[in-house]
Amino acid sequence: MDIDEIVEAIRHPEGELYYPTTRLICLENTHANCGGRCISVEYTDKVGEVAKKHGLKLHIDGARIFNAAVLNVPALGVPVHRLVQAADSVSVCMSKGLGAPVGSVIVGSKLFITKARRLRKTLGGGMRQVGVLCAAAYVALRDNLGKLADDHRRAKIFADGIKQIKHLSVDAATVETNMIFFSITGSTCLSPANLCQVLEEHGVLAMPVSSTSVRLVLHHQISDNDVLYALTCIKQAVQKLLTDGAAK
């Protein structure tokens, strides 16, 4: 979203009697609906400046922020703490690419965390014996951070393989992390729904995200051989659906 569009969308208390006023700007890094693409530190800093200028808070949904850092560290030298420096608060998911079984954390100032804990309690939230979840999150950070780069490498291989399959297309330039969105074109026999259904029968899980596109996500338990197996299954599934459709 262009910075000017963000500024134009801000609703100020004065003159906004009949509408809610803006208090918060939220960014997601990496951005899931854009295919796991990364938001640069320069963009985040500019949004942070806009937030401060207008008296707003900036929250970063960093569910996959470590994936963004893996992409950026070799190229720009931007570690996670720099990617979120402009934010007032950040949330991080431990159970996505990092591979913990469950859990997320929220990060902010001491005052912010105090308020968050109180609000959680007010809304009925709270858990006991959470040490086991913390231990799993610690192991994820300790052991799996170094595996994220392999997820990205395999996603590129996957995208290159998809491009070789008839009626499927993907913009490899948009595959920056561990997510692949590909499109189905040129056949009425193929749809994201029926393709994903056939793939599931062979142990390959994918998600239809529109009438023409499919999403796949890789994680550290997916090997190079698994990628090749999935590509083979996709190719065979496409051929099966085309053959079945032609026979009707």
Image (cartoon, rainbow, N blue to C red):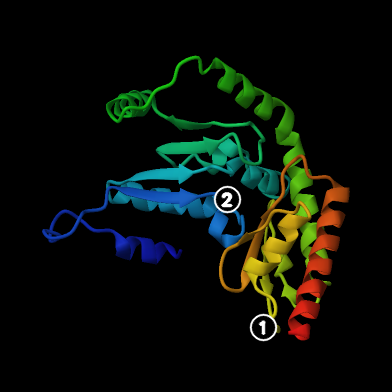
Q: Is residue 17 above or below residue 115?
A: below
Q: Out of 50 and 171, give the one closest to the viewer.
A: 171
Element carrying mark 1: loop
Q: Residue at x 30, y 31 (%)?
A: 123
Element carrying mark 2: loop
Q: Is residue 1 above or below residue 191?
A: above
Residue 100 x %, y %: 64, 31
Q: Residue at x 82, y 53 (%)?
A: 227
Residue 25 x %, y %: 37, 50
Which residue is tagged 1?
A: 188
In this picture, residue 60 sits left or right of residue 153? left
Mark 2 or mark 1: name the one nearer the start of the chain: 2
Which kind of residue does numbered mark 1 sit on?
A: Thr
Q: How crowded is mark 1: few (under 14 residues within 10 Å), some or many (20 or more)?
A: few
Q: Residue at x 28, y 51 (%)?
A: 54
Residues at marks 2 and 1, CA–CA distance in whole angstroms: 33 Å
Which image quarter holds the C terminus?
Answer: bottom right
Which residue is tagged 2?
A: 30
Q: How crowded is mark 2: few (under 14 residues within 10 Å), some or many (20 or more)?
A: many
Which kind of residue does numbered mark 2 sit on?
A: Thr
In this picture, residue 77 sits left or right of residue 124? right
Mark toward the viewer: 2 or 1: 1
Q: To which quarter of the image does residue 245 belong?
A: bottom right
Residue 173 x %, y %: 71, 66
In this picture, residue 180 sits left or right of residue 18? right
